[in-house]
Image: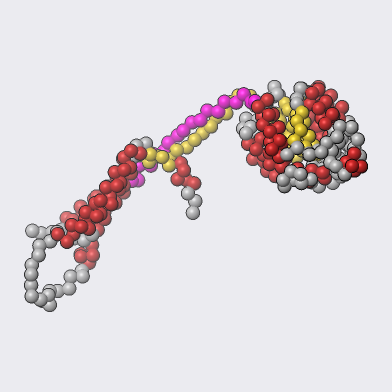
């Protein structure tokens, strides 16, 4: 059974609801006084009396039940139950953001839990949920780059696409940072937003792409796109050698390149050696790039007291009819 609809029910005068505590008292009072309501007559035998299990006898408690139902309904009606509807109107200026994910094979390393890519997806999901006024898109890259979701205000679509990201989505492995950044900038170049940013997450050294990182960096500067680079991993080298990981058995990323791209485009560079530090990087970006968004909330109420009034009055009328007709008492 679904109870979500009850979350929207409120009372205009909730201080009247304690009157419902009268109901248990009235029931107890009726039960305690029922044996005192009739006269007593002592007889030597009951054999001459006719059976009293008639339909009128079975209906005798009905007026009291109707009175209790009427009183309950009228108290609830007096408290004015209402259904609340909330509308939100957003105005202001948001930021256009592209989340650029490295999905190369090294992103499945489990120095993050459950692995680097899944941790990046989880933190990015939290970031999207905190940015209601922004348009957000997604680009993924390994040796190639691909627009998984164009920039949009439909955050449900963005979150669904983040959930589908996995290693192997693009057939060839590699870490084409230049291609991933160039594709991200291409998604933002026609944007009319005053602020355009790319959050690029990678754990590798650039190799395997067709667009060099310096070309992608110049494109970002040309179109006014700030790039925030996040280097993910517990081991890092700065020599820019793509074979370093294979030679040493350690996973690496070129933080010198990432720092240069971030600095040249007006962004910042972060390193994330754990899931917590990755989350801190996103929080820092969230504070640096604030959207000028104002949300106005409107509450609308729909009155629900009328059905309770009608039901209560119907119970009162039915009780009177029973007492004046079939259950009428004669002196």
**Residue positioned most to the bottom:** 47
Measured from the top left, where is residue 235 in percent x and y? Answer: 81, 38
Q: Which residue is depicted at the point 85% across and 42% down? A: 250
Measured from the top left, where is residue 313 in percent x and y? Answer: 27, 47
Q: How many labels does the image show?
A: 0
* 305 within the magenta span: yes
Residue 183 visible here: no
Q: For the C terminus, which image quadrant?
A: bottom left
Q: Which residue is depicted at the point 22% across and 67% down? A: 55
Magenta span covers which residues?
290-310
Q: Which residue is depicted at the point 81% across and 27% down? A: 259
* 49 within the magenta span: no
User: Observer-nearest residue: 260 or 51?
Assistant: 260
Q: Which residue is depicted at the point 47% across and 45% down? A: 5
Quadrant hosting residue 202: top right
User: Observer-nearest residue: 134 or 129?
Assistant: 129
Q: Is residue 42 left or right of residue 219?
A: left
Quadrant hosting residue 104: top right
User: Observer-nearest residue: 306 or 142?
Assistant: 142
Quadrant hosting residue 83: top left
User: Is residue 193 positioned above or below 310 on the image?
Assistant: above
User: Is residue 258 positioned above or below 235 on the image?
Assistant: above
Query: What color scheme is it?
Result: secondary structure
Residue 93 visible here: yes
Measured from the top left, where is residue 141 in percent x and y? Answer: 81, 39
Measured from the top left, where is residue 185 in percent x and y? Answer: 78, 29
């Amino acid at each position: 059974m679904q109870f979500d609809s009850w979350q929207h029910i409120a009372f205009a005068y909730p201080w009247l609801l304690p009157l419902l505590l009268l109901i248990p008292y009235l029931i107890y009072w009726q039960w305690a006084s029922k044996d005192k309501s009739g006269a007593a007559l002592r007889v030597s035998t009951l054999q001459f009396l006719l059976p009293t299990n008639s339909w009128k006898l079975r209906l005798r408690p009905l007026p009291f039940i109707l009175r209790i139902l009427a009183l309950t309904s009228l108290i609830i009606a007096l408290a004015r139950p209402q259904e609340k509807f909330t509308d939100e109107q957003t105005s202001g200026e948001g930021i256009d953001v592209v989340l650029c994910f490295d999905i190369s094979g090294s992103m499945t390393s489990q120095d993050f839990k459950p692995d680097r890519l899944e941790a990046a997806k989880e933190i990015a999901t939290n970031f999207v949920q905190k940015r209601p006024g922004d348009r957000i898109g997604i680009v993924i890259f390994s040796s190639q780059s691909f627009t998984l979701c164009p920039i949009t205000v439909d955050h449900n679509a963005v979150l669904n696409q983040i959930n589908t990201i996995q290693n192997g989505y693009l057939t060839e492995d590699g870490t084409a940072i230049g291609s991933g950044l160039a594709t991200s900038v291409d998604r933002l170049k026609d944007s009319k937003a005053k602020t355009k940013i790319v959050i690029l997450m990678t754990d590798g050294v650039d190799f395997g792409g067709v667009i060099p990182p310096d070309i992608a960096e110049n494109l970002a500067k040309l179109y006014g796109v700030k790039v925030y680079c996040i280097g993910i991993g517990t081991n890092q080298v700065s020599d820019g050698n793509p074979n370093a990981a294979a030679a040493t058995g350690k996973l690496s990323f070129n933080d010198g390149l990432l720092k240069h791209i971030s600095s040249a485009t007006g962004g910042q560079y972060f390193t994330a050696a754990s899931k917590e530090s990755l989350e801190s990087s996103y929080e820092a970006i969230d504070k640096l790039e604030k959207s000028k968004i104002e949300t106005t909330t409107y509450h609308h109420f729909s009155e629900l007291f009328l059905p309770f009034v009608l039901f209560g009055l119907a119970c009162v009328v039915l009780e009177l009819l029973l007492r004046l007709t079939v259950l009428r008492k004669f002196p």
